[in-house]
Amino acid sequence: MQYSKWLNRLIAPAMLTACTWGLASCDQRTATRPSDKEPSGKEAAQQLPEGDALRQLLDETLDESYTRRLNLQDHAAWQILHGVLAFGREFRIEAEGGKQVFAVDYLLQGGKMKGWTMEPGDHGLRAVVEAGTKTGQGHQDQWLALLAQCGLKPDEKLVVGGRTYTMSEYVSQVQWDLPRNVMREYSWTLVGLTTYLPTSAKWKAMDGQEWSIERLMEIELDQEITTSACGGTHRLMGMAVSLNRHLSQGGRLEGVWAKADERIRSSIALTQRLQNPDGTFSTRFFDSRPGTSADLAQNLTATGHILEFVMLASSDEEAKAPWIKRAAVALCDILHTTRDLPLECGAVYHATHALVLYRERTFGSRTFAKPPSPQAE
């Protein structure tokens, strides 16, 4: 991968081709890295785009990702909600008859989707976990975390099975069900709950014990990062989002919060130390060894997830560091090179979300489609 690729894209943009992903959205073919010699560190730095050229590169890459249209016939909630992670309520899908609808509004209004398995709970609304299917919710409270990042208000209505619930009722069921999480994987739970609750919140769950945001953070800090989902990036993202909200609420950097900050800072430092010469991040994630692959899909997965974490955990000033720009440009190149391949949606949309966050920090936010209208009362 050469940094000069971005220049060629600005001069002669390639024709976009719609991607026809299968239900699992996973192709076993290998996207091979070009064999051209990588530029030296100094040469690469000189070739990095600046100003309007960087913004155009980011916007072209995000537009290519946005046009990878998913549909209800071939794709399921696991794929579609990853698209929602990247583009929020602006993410469109194809419904019956080829009609384009906003995915989140479609679900809120009672739309049917493979893998969107919800059921009534004794305290509200529960999302059923279907681990390993790549169809339904793969991790406890994954759907809550994804919807929470779309800016849904506590009184936002969700229609399931003809009955209307609110996001508050969904949150209440998650609080009650915490002991059901036998894997003790609270990465997504933290993201969802800290969206709707103060980080000082405490409550009783179904086991009769007192639970709190801090208790969930303590459990997460006790887990092994390198053996966790996606190299540990989801645990780190949960910590980063929760810590940001704790500090924004006037919370102090002490106790469990100081430990979370130390874990986050050390992980960012390790990320920078293990960064590959081409700007990508280690395919070994956080196991203290550098790594890369001839398969661009593996580099996309690692660099996309890690950059997403780094952007969530960094200040506005830190986000503008040259080493982070190198990763963002490298990620643009990978996404452009693989734009016509039916890659796994998780890898594509986590990488896209990372670039959305980077674009916001560098140039401000942008829109991709006319925002859907609020639900009618």
Image (tube, rainbow, N blue to C red):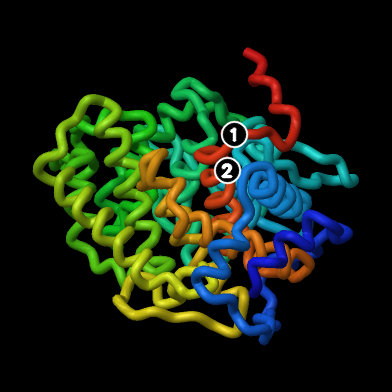
Residue at image x 58%, y 62%? 46
When the figure is inspected, residue 328 is found, relative to residue 228, above or below; the finding is above
**Looking at numbered disc 1 in the image, what kind of residue is underneath it?**
Ser
Residue 59 placement (x, y as % from top left): 70, 46
Q: Residue 365 carries which label?
A: 1
Quarter location, residue 211: top left
Q: In which quarter of the image is residue 106?
A: top right
State whether residue 334 is above or below residue 142. Answer: below
Q: Where is residue 272 in the image (x, y as percent from the top left)?
A: 37, 64
Q: What is the three-letter code of the residue carrying label 2?
A: Arg
Q: Can residue 24 be seen in this view?
A: no
Q: From the viewer's perspective, is 63 left or right of 184?
A: right
Tag 1–tag 2 contact (CB < 8 Å): yes
Quadrant that contains the N terminus = bottom right
Residue 299 x %, y %: 55, 73
Q: Is mark 1 on a helix, strand or loop?
A: loop
> Which residue carries the number 2 mark?
359
Q: Which residue is drawn at 67% across and 84% down?
A: 36
